[in-house]
Amino acid sequence: MKVYGYKKKKTKKALLKAIDDCKSVDQLFALVQHEEINMRMHTLPGASNIPPKRLEIRTIDPKSTPLDRLKAAVRLTVELTK
């Protein structure tokens, strides 16, 4: 589905700043949709036949919010793909 009114894609630097500036999950998801960022879900091993991407417990800050963890995942995807 194309979203009208969204002119052109952001540069990598502008996109990383936009990710940091998101104040809510819906803003972050809208940015992911508009920029057509493809992400892979983290799943339980039995949930599908796709090999899961394991998260190490050491990489998760216990004080971070779910929004912060989503931002980190989106930032990592952008840094690795763009």
Image (tube, rainbow, N blue to C red):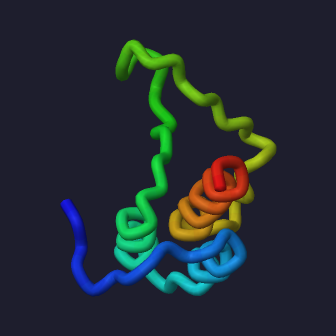
Work out which quarter of the rendered image holds the N terminus and state it: bottom left
Q: Is residue 5 shown above or below 29?
A: below
Work out which quarter of the rendered image holds the C terminus and state it: bottom right
Q: Residue at x 36, y 19 (%)?
A: 48
Occupied quadrant, residue 17: bottom right
How many marks on residues? 0
Residue 56 shown left or right of residue 47 in the figure: right
Residue 22 shown left or right of residue 72 in the figure: left
x, y percent for residue 70 = 54, 61
x, y percent for residue 6 = 34, 82
Single out the residue that lies furthest toward the right.
58
Q: Is residue 65 shown above or below 62?
A: below
Occupied quadrant, residue 72: bottom right
Residue closer to the observer: 56 or 21:
21
Single out the residue that lies furthest toward the front.
8
x, y percent for residue 9 = 49, 73
Q: Is residue 52 shown above or below 55?
A: above
Residue 33 shown left or right of residue 66 in the figure: left
Single out the residue that lies furthest toward the left.
1
Q: Residue at x 73, y 36 (%)?
A: 56
x, y percent for residue 65 = 58, 68
Q: Residue at x 61, y 68 (%)?
A: 68
Residue closer to the observer: 10 or 40:
10
Q: Residue at x 64, y 49 (%)?
A: 81
